[in-house]
């Protein structure tokens, strides 16, 4: 009898990956969607099993082809990667479950098998990175996830997605190439691609020029892929013009995978070995994080397109995640990882609610959603919950992450006070931009010329989509009241990251 | 002598690259990029990386050039007016170049046997390949077995690219969508339109390809079987000499693209229809993955070919041959689909 639990880290990637070519061959309408959903749910189940194992103190390692590391490729799952896996597979499963009707409207029937194959590949690529323990293997999965994401974003009827994707493609390719140049330089000096082995062998050559340059290339390359300010320019349009359900999926997890990799690479390989690197990391990223928070929130204040508004809010949230990490402390890193989880919940829910709105409203413009709460009370209810979570209102998941971030900042003395001022100011800005949506929806008057049309056609979103949106919204409240799962995983992750830092 | 060749080739590459940046004529740029790839392939060959050289020649110089030309046929031949942030881009390129040059100051001397890359994993690969896999080409052993999971990933990169092109190109331009018309009159009209269309395609086919050019056609047709044979040789001889599925796939696709250029794209699609190509794309990737699943079912780890046969060495051989076949099938299918996507676009 085969013990499948041994193979879990491999299955996490292989299940969605091998379902992709199958989905391509499924012709009758809906079958490709069903296959993608089944694979996503299966991957979600595997991620849950891995997380439960990690919480029980189990460590998962897997040797591909049974060749020992560093000669073969190793996979590994710890608390940090488990949290990411939960977020990615959860986002994919929920988006697919709720998004069928919306995707049917966006993607022509004959192109659907191709679309769902690309979806599965994006999923496989994104989960492939957190389980990989090998620097080149990471690159391979980065290629798969990026290429597939370009396809997904360009998938809808919105032709403006094409120039947006082209920009994303150019920037993404530069980011991945920078990462590869960095890995190549490290390989030149150490002869290894396995991350743990690399961390050991880099010690002897740490002060040499190729390693220093590699650290720069890898940091900037990954920052580009993670949309760290000011390298975020590809993100707003890509998220805005993508099919709504794709924005739900990618908005919840895509940039977080790059942030995960940035933290893991930096804390495992560079900080223990390069003298003073943790300070450089901090001094380089902290100002960028603060700028991202202030400028991202600031632009969101004036945006009138709903999706672009929340895309800019994502730029700010990426800033929060980096801010926590740049404190280089257990509390800071815990806050950073909790933020990854909670932001995925809040932003995923928001984009789900926006998908609901888009099912009944022609434009996602602030002017178009006047009176939406009257026709779609449930949708707007979920939106309010998620919006409050994004702001950080007590009782929601977002409050937990802000609380941890502020606690971490308090440890830092004077600079901490300044950081707290930034966090509070940007939270108020978030309140304003969320309110800018809520106000017309609840208190706005529908324009007289649109009145007849609207009352005749607008009604609540499809029930499955609405149910999924509410599951996500309730998760925001649940993890606001009982945050032990993300917090435990995050503090374990922080401990893992800091284990090697001097 | 090798150094002299190397310097000569690198100088030519720099000149080609500069010319490529300078030219405004896209056709010239595409041809130059083909030349650049060929020079690169020659360089790889000088460095004794015959496998990489073969890949670069087949994919970089061969197929990419054809695809670029296909894309050019859909657009104009001249570059648009320069964009405003050209100087930003130039600045980034210059800074990046300087930093990479700075990084080379401390790198191990070229060909140094004491360099880390030759001291750490490489000796283990050489010893283990002899012992556990027993094939002469260590590169194939690393790609297909030791790091087979990466190669599976790369096959899926090719697969994803194929899906992307098929997805983006399968939208027909809105102006040519047939307008449905109810009633018998509509049917009649539809019938007439179909007839007219059939006539059109016939005419189009007549003028397609190089059918009226006798010499290229005869020479080309003579070449195709040899190219196919060489592709199969590269595919199945990869364990012994340079080669493998990626290169073989590109070579076989090149042969069929040559056929399409000679006889017209429609004729090539009649020989291998798009549905078959889709089957190839998915089938090759599935074949590779199925080997991994089979090794799990037989009690090993994913892609542990040793369990495929009673004798681990034989198992490794079987595994490598099958997954290389999977690679070749997918690469052929994807490259041909991409070609047809571009070429078919022209007819619409």
Image (cartoon, helix red, strand yellow):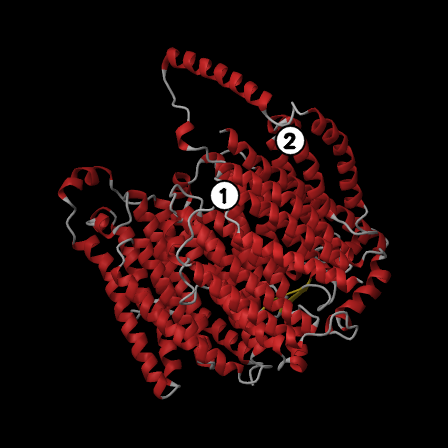
Residue A280 lies, with reference to residue A58, above or below; the image says below
| Residue B177 can be seen in this image | yes
Pick the front one: B182 or B197: B197
Q: In the rendering, at what x and y percent does residue B31 appear?
A: 61, 45
Residue A344's disc number: none
Pick the front one: A326 or A394: A326
Q: Residue furthest left?
A: A448
Q: Say which residue label 2 marks.
A: B260
Residue at disc 1, secondary structure: helix
Q: In the rendering, at what x and y percent does residue A128 appear?
A: 58, 59
Q: Tell me if label 2 and label 1 are in contact, CB under 8 Å.
A: no
| Residue A123 can be seen in this image | no
Q: Residue drawn at (38%, 22%), measured in percent from left and top?
A: B180
Q: Chain of mark 1?
A: A
Q: Chain of mark 2?
A: B
Pick the front one: A85 or A51: A85
Task: Name the quadrant of the N terminus of chain B.
Answer: bottom right
Q: Picture quarter containing residue B216?
A: top right
Q: In the rendering, at what x and y percent does residue B143 appear?
A: 73, 56
Q: Residue drawn at (79%, 72%), measured in percent from left and top?
A: B113
Q: Say which residue label 1 marks.
A: A115
Question: How many numbered dots are placed on residues in this image?
Answer: 2
Question: In front of the other: label 2 or label 1?
Answer: 2
- On the rendered structure, is A501 left or right of A350? right
Q: Picture quarter containing residue A117?
A: top right
Pick the front one: B299 or B43: B43
């Amino acid at each position: 009898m085969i013990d499948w639990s041994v193979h879990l880290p491999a299955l996490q990637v292989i299940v969605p990956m091998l379902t992709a070519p199958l989905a391509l061959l499924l012709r009758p309408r809906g079958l490709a969607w069903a296959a993608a959903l089944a694979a996503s749910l299966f991957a979600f189940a595997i991620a849950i099993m891995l997380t439960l194992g990690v919480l029980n103190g189990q460590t998962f390692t897997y040797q591909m082809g049974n060749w020992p590391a560093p000669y073969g490729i190793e996979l590994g799952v710890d608390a940090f990667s488990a949290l990411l896996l939960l977020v990615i597979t959860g986002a994919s499963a929920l988006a697919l479950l709720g998004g069928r009707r919306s995707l049917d409207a966006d993607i022509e029937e004959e192109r659907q098998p191709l679309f769902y194959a690309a979806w599965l590949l994006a999923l496989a690529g994104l989960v492939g990175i957190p389980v990989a323990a090998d620097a080149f293997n990471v690159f391979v999965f980065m290629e798969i996830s990026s290429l597939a994401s370009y396809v997904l974003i360009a998938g809808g009827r919105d032709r403006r997605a094409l120039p947006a994707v082209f920009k994303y493609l150019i920037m993404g390719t530069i980011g991945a190439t920078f990462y590869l140049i960095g890995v190549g330089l490290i390989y030149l000096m150490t002869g290894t691609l396995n991350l743990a082995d690399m961390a050991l062998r880099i010690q002897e050559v740490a002060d040499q020029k190729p390693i220093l340059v590699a650290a720069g290339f890898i940091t900037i390359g990954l920052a580009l892929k993670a949309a760290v300010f000011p390298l975020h320019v590809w993100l707003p349009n890509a998220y805005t013009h993508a099919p709504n359900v794709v924005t739900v999926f990618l908005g919840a997890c895509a940039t977080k995978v790059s942030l995960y990799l940035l933290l893991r690479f930096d804390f495992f390989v560079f900080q223990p070995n390069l003298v003073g690197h943790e300070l450089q990391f901090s001094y380089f990223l902290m100002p960028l994080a603060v700028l991202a928070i202030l400028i991202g929130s600031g632009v969101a204040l004036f945006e009138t397109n709903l999706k672009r508004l929340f895309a800019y809010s994502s730029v700010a949230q990426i800033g929060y995640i980096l801010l926590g990490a740049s404190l280089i402390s257990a509390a800071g890193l815990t806050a950073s990882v909790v933020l990854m989880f909670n932001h995925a919940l809040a932003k995923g829910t928001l984009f789900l609610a926006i998908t609901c709105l888009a099912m009944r409203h022609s434009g996602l413009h602030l002017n178009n959603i006047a009176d939406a709460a009257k026709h779609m009370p449930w949708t707007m209810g979920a939106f309010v919950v998620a919006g409050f979570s994004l702001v950080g209102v007590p009782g929601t998941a977002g409050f937990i992450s802000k609380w941890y971030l502020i606690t971490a900042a308090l440890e830092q003395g004077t600079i901490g006070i300044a950081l707290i001022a930034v966090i509070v100011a940007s939270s108020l800005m978030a309140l304003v931009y969320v309110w800018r949506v809520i106000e017309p929806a609840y208190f706005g008057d529908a324009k007289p010329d649109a009145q007849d049309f609207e009352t005749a056609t607008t009604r609540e979103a499809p029930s499955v989509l609405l149910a999924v949106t509410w599951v996500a919204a309730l998760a925001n409240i649940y993890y606001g009241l009982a945050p032990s799962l993300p917090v435990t995983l995050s503090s374990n992750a922080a401990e893992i990251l800091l284990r090697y830092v001097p | 002598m090798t150094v002299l060749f190397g310097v000569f080739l690198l100088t030519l590459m720099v000149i080609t690259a500069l010319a490529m940046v300078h030219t405004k004529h896209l056709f010239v740029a595409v041809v130059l990029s083909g030349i650049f790839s060929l020079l690169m392939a020659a360089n790889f060959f000088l460095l004794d990386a015959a496998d990489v050289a073969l890949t670069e020649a087949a994919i970089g110089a061969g197929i990419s050039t054809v695809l670029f030309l296909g894309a050019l046929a859909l657009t104009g031949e001249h570059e648009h007016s320069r964009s405003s942030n050209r100087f930003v881009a130039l600045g980034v390129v210059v800074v990046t170049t300087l930093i990479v040059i700075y990084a080379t100051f401390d790198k191990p001397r070229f060909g140094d046997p004491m360099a880390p890359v030759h001291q750490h994993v490489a000796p283990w690969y050489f010893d283990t390949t002899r012992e556990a896999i027993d094939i002469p080409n260590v590169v194939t052993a690393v790609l297909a077995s030791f790091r087979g999971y990466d190669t599976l990933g790369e096959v899926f990169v090719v697969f994803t690219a194929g899906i992307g092109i098929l997805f983006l190109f399968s939208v027909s331009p809105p102006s040519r969508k047939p307008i449905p018309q109810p009633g018998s009159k509509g049917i009649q009209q539809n019938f007439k339109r179909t007839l007219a269309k059939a006539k059109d395609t016939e005419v189009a086919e007549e003028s397609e390809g190089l059918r009226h050019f006798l010499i290229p056609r005869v020479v080309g047709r003579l070449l195709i079987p040899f190219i196919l044979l060489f592709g199969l040789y590269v595919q199945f001889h990869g364990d012994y000499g340079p080669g493998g599925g990626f290169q073989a796939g590109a070579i076989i696709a090149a042969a069929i693209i040559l056929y399409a250029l000679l006889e017209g794209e429609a004729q090539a699609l009649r020989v291998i229809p798009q549905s078959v190509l889709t089957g190839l794309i998915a089938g090759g990737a599935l074949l590779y993955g199925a080997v991994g699943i089979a090794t799990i079912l037989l009690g090993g780890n994913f892609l542990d070919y040793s369990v495929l046969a009673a004798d681990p060495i034989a198992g490794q051989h079987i595994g490598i041959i099958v997954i290389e076949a999977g690679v070749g099938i997918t690469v052929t299918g994807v490259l041909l689909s991409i070609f047809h996507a571009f070429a078919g676009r022209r007819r619409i």
